[in-house]
Amino acid sequence: MKNATHTAAQSPKDAAHLRKLRYRAWHRGTREMDLLLGPFADDMLEKLDSQELNDFESLMDVPDGDLQDWILHNMMAPDEFETALLKRIRNFNHERRA
């Protein structure tokens, strides 16, 4: 069964966790990655289910160059990172550039 999506009625702990993830998305180390992940975090974090949030947090630990290549389709992501969330991030950024 799919976990419930996060809503405005989150616990303070959940809200703090989302703020932390949003901050990490906007402060990656390279401006290019900030611009790929920050807007996605702003628009989508509160809509992600628990598994997607876990996947997003895992992506935050990937080096910028690798993650940028995966998002921009310059390199295949390893199987453990090739998730529905990574596809959503790719689609989000593709639509923003279109």
Image (cartoon, rainbow, N blue to C red):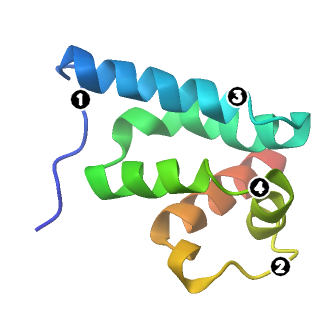
Where's residue 88, x and y in %?
55, 60
Please give the residue where the numbered disc 1 appears in the rendered image. Answer: 7
Numbered badge on residue 97: none
Whether residue 50 sits left or right of residue 84 in the image: it is left
Query: Tag 2, which secondary structure?
Result: loop
Tally the numbered discs.
4
- The percent position of residue 51, horizontal first and vertical second, equals 31, 58
Task: Give the image quarter of residue 42.
Answer: top right
Q: Which mark is residue 26?
A: 3
Relative height, residue 22 to residue 85 (above, below): above
Residue 80 percent location from the top left of the image: 52, 78
How far, Cα to Cα, is label 4 from label 1? Answer: 30 Å
Q: CA distance from mark 4 to mark 3?
A: 14 Å
First in residue order: circle 1 vs circle 3:
1
Circle nearer the N terminus (2, 1) = 1
Residue 75's label in the rendered image is 2
Kind of residue at disc 2: Met
**Vertical side of 58 occupied by 45: above or below:** above
Q: Give the secondary structure at mark 3.
A: helix
Which corner quadrant of the image does residue 5 belong to?
top left
What's the residue type where badge 3 is placed?
Trp
Decide which of tag 4 and tag 3 comes sooner along the chain: 3
Nearest-to-viewer mark from 4 and 1? 4
- Near-viewer residue (67 or 97): 67
The residue that label 4 is drawn on is: 63
**Which comes sooner in the sequence, label 4 or label 2?**
4
Q: CA distance from mark 2 to mark 1?
A: 34 Å
Q: Secondary structure at mark 1?
A: loop
